[in-house]
Image (cartoon, rainbow, N blue to C red):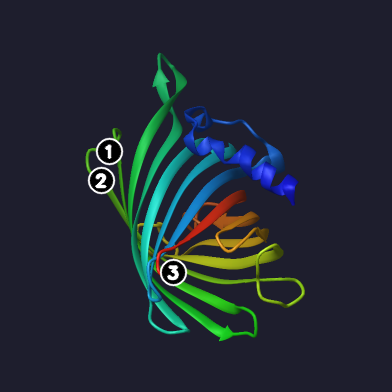
Amino acid sequence: MKKFIGLLILVLPPLFNSQAQQHIDFNMFNGSGELRSIYVQRHRLSDKYTLNIDAGSYLGLGNNVWTRWGFRGIVARKLSDFYSVDIGFMYNRVNYFDDVPVEDTFEEIEVTRHEYRQIQSLNISYPRLQSSAIKHRIRLEERIFTSVKKETPDFKMRLRYRISHQGRFDGQAVAPKSLFYKTSAEFNFNIYQEGEDVFWVRGRYCFGLGYQMNSKFSADANYYFEHNNASKASSQVLTHIFQFTLRQTIYWNN
């Protein structure tokens, strides 16, 4: 387990390292890849309210000719043992590479794009099992993009549905000094301008392993397989995502 935590310590520094925002030529799977390093801080304000803050570095690999970093804040309210709602905001700074004509040739230049994302979610925990629950998340996102290449901002809207489960292999509740698994499937739907002529724009499937160090800290490593549909005329884009996350919980209601 110490090796696993050590790996996270090596990967998480790119959150604060501008050199990590360089284009990386990495052709594993001969396709698109992404490496994510994320730090999550959860503030338990009361029995009903939680503030979630996270910051992440997202490195494009292989055919993904972009990198990005971003942060997000979400306030959640618990309605019952089965339901909760949340609202939040996310900012992403995306650096991607574009070919521009220069004297009958093409030169690759770096272009910066800013994303401002509003978030509203309904979360459902059902069915509730003896030591865990099957979790469903229905999320609506409004996204605004700006860049020097666009005179007017682009606006997009999508609906996301995710089903997930987390638990221990022995069926017991996740507790300090225990290993756990994470699994999920998420589907994104085009509400406005996410795709040209498709409704289902993305599917993402995850399996991961985590370790609960104590009541305040946990870490997990996840693999995601993702497929995107920009339009009916274009072929699917397949992406392999590797995500390392360090999570901290702060209890203000104790």
Q: Is residue 63 visible?
A: no
* Mark 3 element type: loop
Specify the amino acid type for callout 3.
Asn
Taking the view exactly as shown, the residue that stands out farthest to the front is 254
Specify the amino acid type for callout 1.
Lys
Q: Residues within 10 Å of mark 1 (few under 14, many from 20)?
A: few
Q: Circle 2 is placed at which residue position?
A: 153
Q: Circle 3 is placed at which residue position?
A: 254
**Hey, which quadrant is residue 60 in on the image?**
top right
Mark nearer the N terminus (3 vs 1): 1
Q: What is the x, y in percent for residue 139?
A: 41, 68
Taking the view exactly as shown, the residue that stands out farthest to the left is 152
Q: What is the x, y in percent for residue 211?
A: 67, 59
| CA gap, disc 2 and disc 1 | 7 Å
| In front: label 3 or label 1 | 3
* Mark 2 element type: loop
Q: Is residue 238 above or below residue 23?
A: below
Q: Circle 1 is placed at which residue position?
A: 150
Q: What residue is at 40 percent from the left and 64 percent from the top?
A: 252
Q: Does the residue at mark 2 contact the one at mark 3 (Cβ under 8 Å)? A: no
**Residue 123 relative to residue 208: left or right:** left
**Residue 87 relative to residue 217: left or right:** left
Q: Residues within 10 Å of mark 2 (few under 14, many from 20)?
A: some
Q: Is residue 136 visible?
A: yes
* Mark 1 element type: loop
Mark nearer the N terminus (2 vs 3): 2
Which one is nearer the viewer's eye here, 182 or 77?
77
Which one is nearer the viewer's eye here, 45 or 108?
45
